[in-house]
Image (cartoon, rainbow, N blue to C red):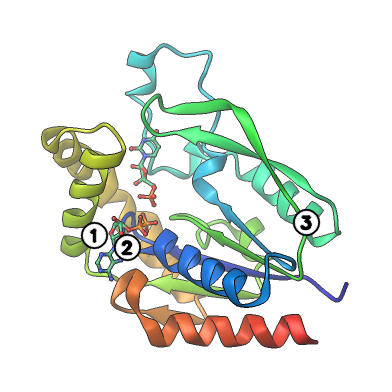
Amino acid sequence: MGKTTIIAIAGASASGKSLFASTVYQELVAELGGNGIAILAEDAYYRDQSHLTFEQRQLTNYDHPSAFEHELLVQHLEQLRDGQAVAMPQYSYKSHTRTTETIKVQPGRVIMVEGILLLHDPHLRKLFDISVFMDTPLDVCLLRRMTRDVEERGRTIQSVAEQYEETVRPAFFEFILPSKQFADLVVTRGGQNEIAIDLIKSKIRQLLAE
Ligand SMILES: Nc1ncnc2c1ncn2[C@@H]1O[C@H](COP(=O)(O)OP(=O)(O)O)[C@@H](O)[C@H]1O
Ligand SMILES: O=c1ccn([C@@H]2O[C@H](COP(=O)(O)O)[C@@H](O)[C@H]2O)c(=O)[nH]1
């Protein structure tokens, strides 16, 4: 296998990172088969909090870099780059901790990883060959997060609004927006920007053919 290329997709919460990454991944798997491409989520590397009560977990700031076990993500990306499979943790947004399951991720010629604080961390940045930033206006992100978190993550409208004011918005301006400078490609219109999806797909096709 040739050199592994690691593609990072960063941006605000609900900016469309996971839709973008999964669209690229699924369309290429349908076209070329699953061999050669792997996909990881930074959210899977939220710290395990099973030693805390649910009430204590609700007090964690999930938008601060300290909430993530980035050391493990770095280790897993290095292992994948070196041709070894990894056991990616699974995280539950409803219980705010890891589940007992893991998913085996096989190494591939191309590894995609998506998450809010990927480009903030210099240790992670060193591993990325291509960095994408989803540049979706924050009010659009909030509306999408409101719908998604109520429908899929067990939240109320009030809890989404409170968390947004307390941690999500401040962390966007302190950590996420300043990390945009490290992106190679800045994508508007979220996870449905077909031109950007096609550009990344073409790049991956080219890498897989080398
Ligand atoms: N361009 C878009 N138009 C409409 N809805 C979108 C668009 N991009 C993302 N969404 C929706 O917004 C929500 C958040 O997107 P998601 O990909 O989960 O964001 P992120 O991974 O950045 O948190 C999801 O319900 C997704 O389907
Ligand atoms: O237990 C948790 C863990 C995370 N969050 C929120 O999730 C987003 C990051 O995920 P996206 O898929 O990029 O939206 C982050 O803003 C955290 O606030 C949570 O609420 N609870």
Quadrant where the image shows the N terminus = bottom right
Q: Earlier in the sequence, mark 1 or mark 2?
A: 2
Q: Earlier in the sequence, mark 3 or mark 2?
A: 2
* Disc 2 residue: CB within 8 Å of ligand 1: yes
- Give the residue pinned by disc 2: 15
Proximity of marks 1 and 2: CB atoms separated by less than 8 Å = yes
Which x, y percent locates residue 106?
A: 76, 54
Q: Residue at x 35, y 64 (%)?
A: 16
Which label was assigned to residue 141?
1
* Disc 1 residue: CB within 8 Å of ligand 1: yes
Q: Residue at x 48, y 85 (%)?
A: 198
- Give the residue pinned by disc 3: 80
- Say if 17 sits above or below 30 in the image: above
Q: Residue at x 74, y 47 (%)?
A: 75
**For residue 63, what is the image quadrant?**
top left
SS of the residue under disc 3: helix
Q: Amino acid at mark 2?
A: Ser
CA gap, disc 3 and disc 2: 27 Å
Q: Is residue 30 visible?
A: yes
